[in-house]
Image (cartoon, rainbow, N blue to C red):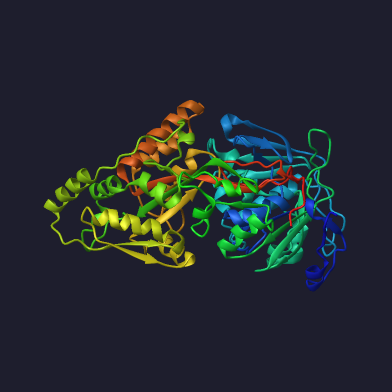
Amino acid sequence: MIQRVLWCGLAAALGGCNTTNYDTSKVFRYNESANLTSLDPAFARTLEPMWVVDQVYDGLVELDADLNVQPLIADSFYSENNGTKWVFVLREDVHFTGHPQVPGLAIGRRLTASDVVFSLNRLRDPEVASSGRWILGALDPSSEGAGLVARGADTVEFTLKQPFPPFLGLLTTAYANIVAPEAVEHFGKDFRRNPVGSGPFKLAWWLEDVACVLHKNEGYWELDEAGKHLPYLDAIHISFASDMGAEYQGLLQGKFDFMSGLHAAYMEELLEADGSLRDEHASTVRMEIAPFLKTDYIGFFVEPSDQEWLPWQDQAVRSALSLAIDRKGIARALRRGSVVPTRDFVPPALVGRTNPRPIAHDIEQARAMMDSVASMHPRPWPEMVLSTTSDYTDLCVALQYQWEAIGLEVGIDVVAPSTHRERVANGKATAFRKSWLADYPDAENFLSLFRTSNHAPSGPNYTHYSNLAFDTGLDSAMMENNATGRIARYDALNGMVSQALPLIPLFHDQVTHFVRHGVEGWEINSVNRLDLRRVSKTIATD
């Protein structure tokens, strides 16, 4: 007999009860160990909220599985004036979900161009203080509407200061999802808990630190190829268990339908030494992998110090440290081959390559380089303190061992993630482990980390690297209309960073999903966005 689940109990505790019974074969379940703090697209800066926000809201455009930009609620789009003007014509069949507490939204209404303008202008509102303001940085503030206007109910126009080829990609980010103005105005700051969008699902209830449940949006506009309304699922259930081992066990036991990524708590039990799925799990789950537009690296605060010479601020020392790292050995021993060793910050696919360039590991050459520096700056040198979080202690210990072997004293400071972020952003970390995940699939997203104008804390240039030739070169790449020519310029800039080494690239990650058998219609992509519109389950999992 097919088991059924009633979501009424906890919903009643939250002030209401939805009496719908759901077939468990139509409820998709996963765990989010990092919890959620907001369901407002304006604050969707990490994958955890992005995954939920993308179910509740839609944007003008989206990325397909091959990372090409496709229309979503925009029926069409085109550019004018050499790429400085972008015009989007909206679909006529997109509606916000209804909300009984919001005047004007009792049964929902059509999404129009003014809603798009409202939603994106929220990102620029200082009172909102959205972390997504930067996606509109290319707009011309001196033009009508500061670069963003609605023309009637169906048309939205963007005016840019100058051509910016990645602009379409910026509009695929979760920040650019469209919200219902009435709901924002009604709930105020509590909109984070009361989302109203036009996406395939809508919020049923959310109890922080416990669980979040989304129900199917019965009025969703999108149809599949056979003319059937999406989504196929009736509900999504998201748990918030912080124990990664418990998440892994939940996957094997059928409590969860999928799990993303690898963690030391279960990696050795789940994978063979070569990174393949162990045979004993093959009957329960499948592993799906895609190259991830993400780079793990060690960054250095390279802004010169007036007080003393610091070894890690010397480019020759950083080059020696890079040569001393056994990236392949670390990838094999600590990550079971689930990451791709690299010497470049920009993933190869974004600079026209299939694979990363060859890496070098030469301890003797690294020692010789360090000795050469020591002839000009005699030892002893100050200890370098490497800041990290507990998830990456094993990696930092391996680097500590390899760097001390060539004559650099290294300490490891393990701190809470929030403390780590604050220290890195404010230049208080001498050296730090960090990663960069692409918000949109263009090399500019990676290269912008090295712009002088992006120095942290106001931007993502945590190293404070500054090079006028680099800044000018990136500006020139933005003016290049030919895609092949622009990629060639990107590659040259990537090489410039690889030579200067304000940071040492370690690995390009892979998107790794473990999905239970019976889950169909699964899509995996290189930015690790979660799309559940076409997902279905052929069996009930208990």
Q: Going 62% across and 61% down the picture, which residue do you hit?
A: 128
> Residue 165: image x %, image y %?
54, 35
Q: Going 15% across and 55% down the picture, which residue do you hit?
A: 377
Q: Is residue 114 left or right of residue 303?
A: right
Residue 40 falls in image quadrant: bottom right
Count the numbered circles shown.
Answer: 0
> Residue 468: image x %, image y %?
34, 42
Quick one: quadrant of the N terminus? bottom right
> Residue 225: image x %, image y %?
79, 33
In the rendered image, the vertical position of residue 364 relative to residue 483, given as above or below: below
Residue 500 falls in image quadrant: top left
Q: In this view, does 399 lie to the left or right of 44?
A: left
Q: In this view, does 493 lie to the left or right of 198?
A: left
> Residue 537: image x %, image y %?
75, 47
Q: Going 43% across and 59% down the picture, which residue do you hit?
A: 392
Work out which residue is located at the far front of the displayed protein and give it.
Answer: 280
In the rendered image, the vertical position of residue 380 relative to residue 272, given as above or below: below
